[in-house]
Amino acid sequence: MDSPGLTHQDCLSLLGVAGCCVTATVAVDGGSPVPVAAFVQPGGDVLVPTGIDPSLPRAAVGRPVTVEIDGGEDGWLITGVGLARPLGHRDRPRADHPHAMLYAFDNGFRVRIARLTGQRVDGAPPIPRQRTGASPGAVLSVPRSAQ
């Protein structure tokens, strides 16, 4: 049985908070997919910083780009299609951002996503509950030496 598709809004909800970092693949104008680190923005646009290498932005800017984000163990796959634009000054993270590698934003592009679509991926293994070594409801005691 096929799982129902995910709407644009469903996809935004799954991607979560603004500026979340994801591993994605991008394909420029139907070409071969390239794995990249990317940042998803609140409206769904995707920032792809490339550091000192300008080759991917040179190939992508002004062309249609397909972005694919795999939810991994969460069991979803999201695809976005849009037009690539060069990264602008406002696309850079704040200088005081704890995880910012500002040099990575020297080159790159922003994919102006026209639409996001997605699907639940069946067959994702369920994550088993953690074993505690005690029977359910048992109270574990802490040795005095560890207190």
Image (cartoon, grey):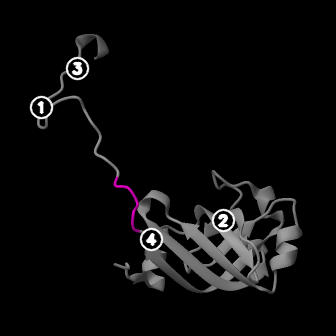
At label 1, which amino acid type do we have?
A: Ala
Q: Circle 4: is it few (<14), some (14-19), or many (20+) Cα within 10 Å?
A: some
Name the quadrant of the C terminus: top left
Residue 123 is one of the magenta-drawn residues: yes
Say which residue label 2 marks: 38
- The kind of residue tagged 4 is Leu
Quadrant of the rendering where the N terminus is positioned: bottom left
Q: Which residue is mark 3?
A: 142
Q: Label 2 to label 4, Cα distance in Å? A: 15 Å
141 relative to 21 in the view: left or right: left
Question: Which residue sits at x=37%, y=78%?
Answer: 3
| Quarter of the view holding residue 108 | bottom right
* Residue at image coords 76%, 83%: 29
Amino acid beneath label 2:
Ala
Q: Which tag is nearer the camera, tag 1 or tag 3?
A: 1
- Helix or strand or loop: what does disc 3 sit on? loop
Q: Which residues are magenta?
A: 122-126
Q: Earlier in the sequence, mark 4 or mark 3?
A: 4
Give the left or right position of residue 85, taking residue 129 as reference.
right
Badge 1 vs badge 4, beta-carbon distance below 8 Å = no
Of pointers 2 and 3, the one earlier in the residue sequence? 2
Which of pointers 1 and 2 lies earlier in the amino acid sequence?
Answer: 2
CA–CA distance between discs 1 and 4? 36 Å
- Residue projecting furthest to the top: 145
The residue identified by callout 4 is: 14
